[in-house]
Amino acid sequence: MYRNKTFVANKIMGILIECFICFVIVFHIYGCSNRDESISTNILNEMEDLSEFIYEQNRIEDNSLTNKENDLKSNAILNEASNKPSPSILNNKKQKLVEDNELWNNIYLDQGRAVDCVVSQKYNKSIDNELRVSMGDYGDLYLKILELNTNNVIREVFIKQNSVYKIINIPEGKYYLKTAFGKGLQLNQDCEVKFDKNAYYKKSENVLDFYIVDTYYESSVPSFHLSLDVKVSFSTGSQYDSESISMETFNN
């Protein structure tokens, strides 16, 4: 925009100069005195100097704008180059991805088993209770039972797709569940588990109260039946409320 304004101003100045020159020539033709001719000559010289000055200023401004444009282009190229990750960073990311994948090993578990690195499973064989779990056709299930107050895992089991398994002899207490669904069970060196395909992880909001209820006539031993799939619900009709969690939260 600035260059366009300068161009228009220069055109107008050029027209004015040309008109003035024509006036001087006409004045000379009609018999101006030597003194007037001298004045006209001086004016013409001044106009020529002014024209050269304007030309020089335009040349300087054009060079300045060209330099600014070149600087902007150079800065844009430098910024683009600085925003691109260096080859070493890309290689490090690729290496980390490969290492992460190498940490996980495919494993096979029998129905009702936990991974071998689990060293503590709590039972109370004097209590004849159960948590019966029905798994649908979405995939396999890895389930953890955790104490409500301590968040300690007391039992964990693998349950196959389209099967039913009973977790029995659960000690008295209040518990909640963490469930992992998917296909292709994997284990890493930190005894963390995940599914390789179609994985999603849940944490129950329901509390499973396994405390025995004693009455005057008898003792009531609680048991639960849980149907799990993409949708989960208790067989009694009450809703099994849960929230989605990350794989890291499932393992911690």
Image: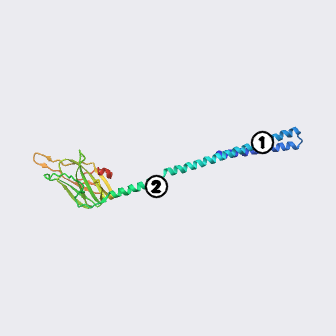
Amino acid carrying mark 1 in the image:
Met
Q: Residue reaching furthest front?
A: 88
Residue type, mark 2 in image: Pro
Q: Quadrant of residue 192?
A: bottom left
The label number, if any, that marks residue 190 in the structure image: none
Frontmost of labels 1 and 2 is 2
Residue to which mark 2 is pinned: 87
Q: Position of residue 187 (x, y in %)?
A: 29, 57
Who's the residue at 12% across and 48% down the image? Answer: 219
Query: What residue sits right under mark 1 in the picture?
Result: 47
Residue 231 visible = no
Residue 141 falls left or right of residue 215? right
N-term-proximal mark, 1 vs 2 = 1
Secondary structure at badge 1 equals: helix
Of helix, strand and loop, which one carries label 2? helix
Question: Percent x, y for residue 205?
Answer: 27, 48
In the rendered image, residue 9, in percent from the top left (x then y), is placed at 70, 44
Image quarter for residue 195?
bottom left
Q: Is residue 184 left or right of residue 172?
A: right
252 lies left or right of 40: left
Residue at 44% over, 55% down: 90
Q: Position of residue 96 (x, y in %)?
A: 38, 55
For the residue pair 203 and 70, the one nearer the viewer reads as 70
Colour scheme in the image?
rainbow
Query: In the rendered image, which quarter is residue 179 located in?
Result: bottom left
Q: Looking at this view, is 184 or 181 the one in front?
A: 184
Neighbour tally class for label 1: few under 14, some 14-19, many 20 plus, Cα within 10 Å = some
Inter-mark Cα distance, 1 to 2: 62 Å
Left or right placement of residue 201 versus residue 28 in this view = left
Q: Is 182 drawn above or below residue 73 in the view shown?
A: below
